[in-house]
Amino acid sequence: LAMNYRGPYRVRADHNMPYPEIQHPGDAIVKVTRSCICGSDLHLYHGLVPDTRIGSTFGHEFTGIVMDVGRDVTRLKEGDRVLVPFNIACGVCPFCKQELYGNCHESNPEATAVGGIFGYSHTAGGHSGGQAEYVRVPFADVGPYVIPEWMDTEDAVMLTDVFPTGYQAAEMGGIKTGDTVVVFGAGPIGIMAARCAWFFGAARVIIIDHIEYRLEFAREFAHCEAYNFKSMQDPVLFIKKTTDYFGADVCIDAVGCEAEGSALQTLTGRNLLLQAGAATALQWAINSVKKGGIISIVGVYGPTFNMVPIGNVVNKGLTIRANQASVIRLLPKLIEHIQQGHIEPKALITHRIPLAEVSDAYRIFSSKLDNCIKTVLIP
Ligand code: NAD
Ligand code: ZN
């Protein structure tokens, strides 16, 4: 049983998907125990990522049990309970050596940009994903991490992407003690970024979205201020006003490309110029950060995007930092945060849905109805 992509807005649970096999001596086969749906999967689901092929299986956030290993695998054995980072990394290429595990060369050698990612189209290497009962895990000695005994599987699955990505969003922002940080997007990633901003010494953390239940969740979980941009005339002006017209020290884009253009239809005045695919949150970030400030982008952009006010980046002397999260690099530190009781990432999980109902799961997560923050599929 595995998720099967049939085209934009169409996925199904398919009992006839092939079983994965060891193809390389460094592979492992993992029986999936938990597999999340991510905001990144929605870009695939909405048909926004090039070369997303019919018949492919998504899923890059999963935990499981090792069923079989290739003859070169030394760090894993049958029966191990593992969490599998979303990036596929060889561990030895020049990028992995710099701990840029999200930019591994070997896992996706033909790519112009991204490294290999499980279940993330042929632009990310064409690796089959973990929204399935079984999945093949390449470079099994590098990415998969044996889950400590004391750790809950659902905390572990949040270490495959959401916690590291939120953490890295804050880290790339170069947050200093006393900073005001604005996070655009109160999905799992933005909420986690807001929570992590405090680890770096932020004095004020503000999150912006238009979905009330998510703003409420962010206030509770991330202890931040949360505002609805639909109730503002202009989010940029709002942020200026609340920072003595200086702007935020750091702005984080945790939105990426939006299929629906939902942000856009409700705004008036100068924002009327915006249109679907116009990277609205990124524009707001650039225009509301202070001069000399830092923009951290973890939002994913499938196709090319225009209307990014690059002139303002130049004239304000901004620094833009962006990447896929380097999960493997961050794991030891984040596991320690969980062990110390600083954070319980599984608190973001609101929906647990059988893999057989994957099409409902996508519909719910995509529509942002039913008070959904994070959805986990259970094979
Ligand atoms: P999500 O879809 O659950 O959340 C996105 C949120 O942004 C929604 O709540 C939506 O209402 C809000 N939003 C839309 N337009 C907005 C705007 N103009 N201003 C403010 N908020 C707006 O997704 P998620 O799982 O939280 O992921 C967020 C982004 O992070 C996605 O683009 C995803 O692809 C990306 N991501 C990146 C990495 C990485 O390693 N870089 C990893 C995981 C996810
Ligand atoms: Zn993800």
Image (cartoon, helix red, strand yellow):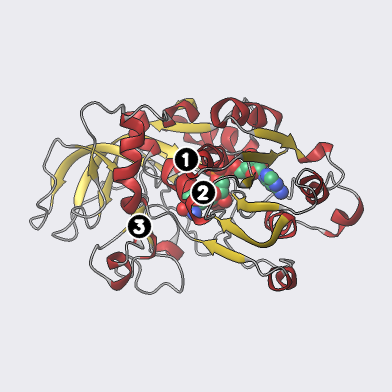
Label 1 belongs to which residue? 199
User: Does residue 114 appear to the left or right of 177 in the view shown?
Assistant: left
Horizontal and vertical percent position of residue 120:
44, 55
Looking at the image, how many numbered discs can be counted on the residues? Answer: 3
Front residue of 345/28: it is: 345
Q: Is residue 178 above or below residue 312?
A: above
Task: Name the residue rendered at 22%, 57% in the picture.
Answer: 139
The image quadrant of residue 218 is top right
Task: Name the residue rendered at 37%, 49% in the picture.
Answer: 129
> Alpha carbon of mark 2 to alpha carbon of mark 3: how far?
29 Å
Label 2 belongs to which residue? 170
Q: Is residue 87 above or below residue 315?
A: above
The amino acid marked with disc number 2 is Ala
Q: Quadrant of the C terminus?
A: top left
Label 3 belongs to which residue? 127
Sequence-earlier tag: 1 or 3: 3
Horizontal and vertical percent position of residue 72:
9, 58
The amino acid marked with disc number 3 is His
Horizontal and vertical percent position of residue 255:
62, 49
The amino acid marked with disc number 1 is Phe
Task: Name the residue rendered at 16%, 58% in the picture.
Answer: 26
